[in-house]
Image (cartoon, rainbow, N blue to C red):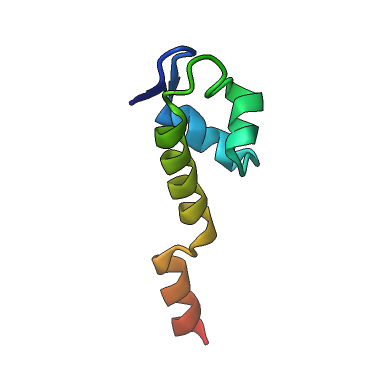
Amino acid sequence: MIICHCHAVNDRQIKEAVTNGVISVRGLHRELNVGNTCGQCLPQARRVLESALMQISEPPAKQEQSIEKAA
């Protein structure tokens, strides 16, 4: 889904940027020019960013279960 129409940035690009170390809207601005022109994308970009950050901070359930079984 396109998040920033001015620079044709989609949600996958934002998620990839998070995987590569971006942790803030300011980082998205530097890496992908999100919010650089009109700013209408900033609320949605922030939601995608926060969701992606939450996904990488939570341990995968399957890994957690296999660790418990091994112990």
Q: Quadrant of residue 26?
A: top right
> Which residue is rendered at x = 43% and y = 26% of the image?
41
Q: Residue furthest bottom?
A: 71
> Which residue is rendered at x = 61% and y = 44% of the image?
23
Residue 43 appears left or right of 53: left
Q: Is residue 24 above or below residue 7?
A: below
Where residue 45 appears, as percent x and y from the top left, is: 45, 34
Q: Is residue 61 above or below residue 69?
A: above
Q: Is residue 66 above or below residue 39?
A: below
Q: How many marks?
A: 0
Where residue 36 appears, as percent x and y from the top left, is: 57, 18
Near-viewer residue (4 or 37): 37
Specify the quadrant that holds the N terminus: top left
Near-viewer residue (10 or 43): 43
Residue 21 appears left or right of 60: right
Q: Quadrant of residue 43?
A: top left
Q: Residue furthest left?
A: 1
Near-viewer residue (55 or 49): 49
Q: Is residue 20 above or below residue 53?
A: above
Where residue 50 appears, as percent x and y from the top left, is: 48, 47
> Which residue is rendered at x = 40% and y = 15% of the image?
5
Where residue 3 appears, as percent x and y from the top left, is: 40, 25
> Which residue is rendered at x = 63% and y = 38% of the image?
20
